[in-house]
Image (cartoon, grey):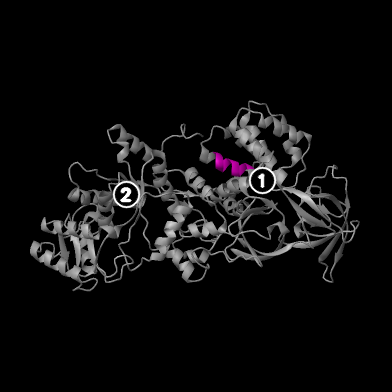
Amino acid sequence: MSEENKPLNFIEQIIEEDLAKGMSKNDLRFRFPPEPNGYLHIGHIKAIGISFGLGEKYNAPVNLRFDDTNPAKEEQEYVDAIKKDVAWLGYTWDKELYSSDYFQQLYDWAVCLIKEGKAYVDSQSSDAMAEQKGTPTQPGIDGPNRNRSVAENLDLFERMKAGEFNAGEHILRAKIDMQHPNMLMRDPIIYRVLKKQHHRTGNDWCVYPMYDWTHGESDYIEQISHSLCSLEFKPHRELYDWFLDQVVEHGKLRPKQREFARLNLSYTIMSKRKLLQLVEDKVVKGWDDPRMPTVSGLRRRGYTPASLRKFVETVGVAKRENVIDVSLLEFCIREDLNKSAPRIMAVLDPVKLVITNYPEGKEEWLEAENNQEDENAGFRKVPFSRTLYIEKDDFKEEAGNKFFRLKLGGEVRLKNAYIIKADSVVKDSKGNITEIHCTYSEDTSKKVKGTLHWVSIKHAIKAEVREYDRLFMEEAPESHPNKDYMDFINPNSLKIIEAFVEPSLKNAKKGDHFQFQRLGYFNVDDDSTSEALVFNKTVGLRDTWTKQSAPKQNEATNQQNNTNMQPKRKAIDVIQQLGKKYTNLPEAKQVKTKADIQELAKTVSYDELQPLFNTAAKKVGTRIAVILVLGVLLNQGQERNEDINEFIDKALDDKNELLVAEAGLIK
């Protein structure tokens, strides 16, 4: 969908309404205000994408403002990491600012509040103040310090600033209304004593402003037009506006706070505190562990800025909280890497294959296409010899007709090479197959159904492959009142494999992405060296969790299914039904439906699909579904034939852009 035809989200509608009412486009200014007390995670990427996305849409400046008001938890390390992450995502901020830039102004305004009788120093214990505050259904009561004189409050506040008191002895509170229905308005804290060295101001200050006081006033100082934050801050909006009422001058722009639903992701936690626990308890190896949802972890795993931005764009901007399936995130990185990642051959679980009629000592360097999705990717040479490694799973001594890989007496094509036939096997004393003996044919025009990847043993390079899985086994690990989220840690979230890769990877650099053909997408890890290659598995070629989660879903519907006792619909029939509606779906639902079709496709045979090649031209949605299924079958080793090529060519000549785009991915 083009940018011009894309419907406005509710924040864009608010901005358009403000512009229609007379606001100048030159007055638009946004900000992203992270706290430098941890690493950014994927939830922050949504907030970043919204603010910087609006900046790009309206050609308006976006400030990067660090909310550094709590020196007890903040470090320069986090500031540097946040800047690196935002820049890596492809965004450019206008000004790098800090709440600490405004400490003097915020303090001066607080003094003005005291002088106007709108703030006071409270010297009670936190328990006493909490008791007086009441509950959501019970109003609060005034405390004994609420009516201190202006002179006494000014004296105490000055002495707080001078460092005469310890933390907790005194606080400065706004004097609003202890009976207010919004508990945040019941004399909120503005300042507290905190004797900690600040990463920017050192020991200049002994009092630090609270977030609610700092937030709106900093927006006002910077003349932010629209202050965007997540839904949990909606109750704070009333306090945000009250604080602004005290300082806004006539003729100056008044910021407007608006809230959006934060990003919640299945099989993931977002709490900084809980993520820190994972690091401190050594469940993971650091903030950039590829299993972590941090930006640095996703980057190390192999996620690209383009895939993360596409994910945020697809999720969209909503007013209500919801949980996004992590498979959508995985889909976005697959789509991105499919277009750009070079294809190479690697074997993760090897078994030796000997081509008995290939001359000993002979070797050939065969031409292999780097990426069929990129016509500019070119070709490379891969070595071929008498002894190869293939995957153990790609061979069975005996197998049925639907097993299109290698079996005794059966033939397959070796990718970029010859057709081979399995003749015999060699086993060890325990009956395990140690060698597969084959013969090859130089007639590569023969039609066979299966294609296998391989590496030449003589030329292969050993590499460490870190195969990552989801860190949590439970879709919502924080949703169980009687269980701790740590109870759902996946003990098999990391598997380290000694693999063999083709020699073209010898000079692969850290961060390089590759598709290990038929296996998934991988990238070179930061630990990799020229002597010891290390790869991280970014994502598989297909969603393997769908099948694993199906039994859980079935448990919830078994009773209903048993009563109905209806025969299960064939996958190909479900795919046709999904295809009929495909072109009428919004983009986010198209992405989900595409993933559903590709998952169902794994159970569809070519014989079931082939009749749909004759689908009428006007049934574009069904034809798109057929293309999607065909892509899966080709990835599984289905040989191309005249019918397949003709169907793809017709799709490429169609007027529908979606159909042409999908056909282009498998041409």
- Going by the numbered disc 2, the residue's amino acid type is Lys
**In the displayed structure, does residue 50 sit left or right of residue 208?**
right
**Front-most of 36 and 277?**
36
* SS at mark 2 in the image: helix
Image coordinates for residue 310, horizontal then vertical, percent? 51, 45
User: Residue sitting at 46 percent across and 32 percent down?
Assistant: 4
* Disc 1 target residue: 377
Q: Secondary structure at mark 1?
A: loop
Q: Nearer the viewer, residue 651 or 32?
A: 32
- Residue beneath disc 2: 234
The answer for how far apart the CA atoms under marks 2 and 1 are is 50 Å
Q: Main secondary structure of the magenta part?
A: helix
Position of 145 relative to 413 (above/below): below
**Magenta-drawn segment:** 590-597
Q: What amino acid is found at the position of numbered circle 1 in the picture?
A: Ala
Residue at the (38%, 61%) spot, across then down: 36
On the image, the x and y values in percent for residue 220 come to: 25, 49
